[in-house]
Amino acid sequence: MKDTWKLGNHEFTSRFILGSGKYSLDLIKAAVENAGAQIITLALRRAATGNVANILDYIPKGVTLLPNTSGARNAEEAVRIARLAREVGCGDFIKIECIRDSKYLLPDNYETAKATEILAKEGFVVMPYMYPDLNAARDMVNAGAACVMPLGAPIGTNKGLATKEFIKILIEEIDLPVIVDAGIGKPSQACEAMEMGAAAVMANTAIATAGDVPAMAEAFRYAIAAGRAAYLAGTGRVLETGAAASSPLTGFLAD
Amino acid sequence: MIKVNGENRDGFAGKTLSELLCGLGYKELYIAVELNGDIVKKDSYGAVILKDGDCLEVVSFVGGG
C-alpha cells in the first residue's frame, strides 16, 4: 500500500517540505527534483519592477506552493499577508509565522492560533509554525489547522532537534500531521524526526548553506525516507543495562 | 501623486490600475495588489481608476522558508 499523508484534502507521498530561501533561483529546480519534494515554501515581499526573474518560473510544475507569512509580527499582519498570497493565485496553502522576537525568531503561539482560526474559516489550508507546546498545539487543532509545525531549534541555526522531547509529546497527542520545521541542520536529524513519527520534515537553511545545494537536498530525501521506513518498521528495543548477544550462545569451538 | 510600495509616483491619477502596473513594469501574472489596504482582485485591475493620494502595495513571491 502506498504510504501517503494529507493536508486538508490534499494527499502527498513526499514527506520533505523544501524551503526556497537563501539560494540561487538557478538551483531551485535541481533542489526540488533531488529532494523529491511536492511542497515548496515561498515568502511574499514588495514586488520588484522591471524585467526581473520571478521564482515562480523556476519551480517545476505540479509542485504545491506553500507561501509563509514571514514578516508578520501578529495575527492581523499574518492574515493580511495570507490573503495577498492567495490573491497571487497559487492556491490556498499558508504557513503561518507570527514572530515578534527578532533575536531568536521564536513564534508567538497565541497570535499564531488567532491567525489560524481566521484563515481556516476563510478556506485556507493552514499550517502553523509554532513552539512545541501541547496546549498551544491543541489550540491550533481547535482553530482549524491542517497540521502543526513545531520547531526543532530556532530558525536558521542548523542545531537539530533541541526540542525533541516536546515534539514527541505532540506526535503522541495531536491527531493532525506533525511536521518538524526549523532548526533541522543535517540529514541524520531529519531521519531522527521521522523515526519518532513526524509526518514530514521541512528544511531550508540546511540545504541553502550546504556546500552543494542539490546534493544535500538528495541526502535529506534519503534520510527522510529512511526515517519513515524505520518508523513504519518499528524500531527495536533498548536494553537499559547489560548486553544481549546477537550470535548463538551454543556451539562454541572450545566446547 | 500615488504611493506605490512606499515611493511617490506622479502621472497616474485618473489612469487605471492596469496602466500603472504596466507603466511601472510589474507583471500582473506574478503579483497581488492592495489599494488603500484592500485587496484588488486580478480581474479588476483594468476597471479600478486611481486617484490622487491613493496608496498601493504590490507584492510577489520570493524565496523563503
Image: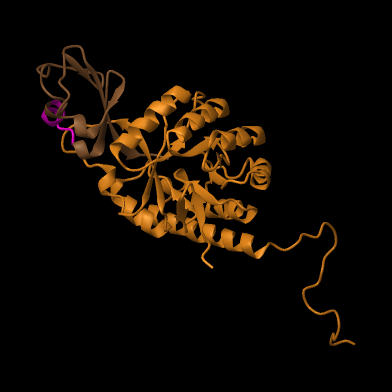
Chain colours: A orange, B brown
* Figure check: A148 above or below B45: below
* Closer to the camera in the image, B6 or A24: B6
Position of A211 with respect to B40 (left or right) is: right
Residue at 46 percent across and 33 percent down: it is A121
Residue B65, picture quadrant: top left
Residue at 30 percent across and 54 percent down: it is A61
Q: Position of residue A50 (x, y in %)?
A: 16, 34
| Res A176 visible | yes
Residue A89, picture quadrant: top left
Residue at 15 percent across and 27 percent down: it is B47
Of all residues shown, which one is farthest toward the right? A255
* Figure check: A203 above or below B22: below
Q: How many numbered discs?
A: 0
> Does B53 appear in magenta?
no
| Res A73 visible | no
Q: Position of residue A110 (x, y in %)?
A: 57, 26
Q: Quadrant of the N terminus of chain A?
A: bottom right
Q: Quadrant of the C terminus of chain A?
A: bottom right
* Figure check: A60 above or below A176: below
Residue at 85 percent across and 79 percent down: it is A249
Q: Position of residue A23 (x, y in %)?
A: 35, 44
Position of B1 with respect to A199 (left or right) is: left
Residues drawn in magenta: B20-27
Q: Position of residue A153 (x, y in %)?
A: 57, 39
* Closer to the camera in the image, A20 or B2: B2
Q: Main secondary structure of the magenta part?
A: helix
